[in-house]
Amino acid sequence: MKITDEIRIRENDNYEKGAQLFEDKGEIWIRYCYWKNGKIEGLYPQMPIWIIKTLYSAMKAKDWL
């Protein structure tokens, strides 16, 4: 697994939340994470990025965005 990108949003001095994109076996995945005092504390379920793209396209087609 190779992390390709990371986005963090600072909530306060000790807590950040965000997401990581990573590559695993040639496929790009995304997962939600949070950091406490600069250390990763929580990793939540991950999914292939194509699922996000499919959901986005479906929501856009329905005018939900």
Image: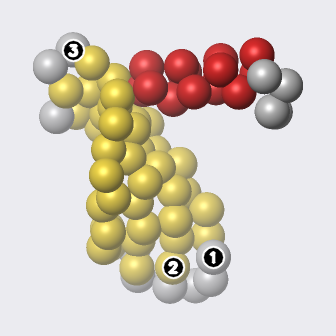
The residue carrying pointer 3 sits among few (fewer than 14), some (14 to 19) or many (20 or more) residues within 10 Å by Cα, namely few
Residue at image coords 58%, 85%? 13
Q: CA distance from mark 1 to mark 2?
A: 6 Å
> Does the residue at mark 1 contact the one at mark 2 (Cβ under 8 Å)?
yes
Q: Where 10 sits versus 59, above or below?
A: below
Residue at numbered disc 2:
15
Left or right: 44 with respect to 65? left
Q: Which mark is residue 26?
A: 3
Of tags 3 and 2, the one toward the viewer is: 3
Amino acid type of the residue tagged 1 in the rendering = Glu
Residue at image coords 62%, 83%? 12
Residue at image coords 51%, 29%? 52
Left or right: 57 with respect to 22? right
2 or 49: nearer the viewer: 49
Image x and y of residue 42, in percent:
32, 69
Lower position in the chain sequence, tag 3 or tag 2: 2
Image x and y of residue 28, in percent:
34, 23
> To which quarter of the image does residue 30 belong?
top left
Q: Which mark is residue 11?
A: 1
Amino acid type of the residue tagged 2 in the rendering = Tyr
Residue at image coords 81%, 33%? 65
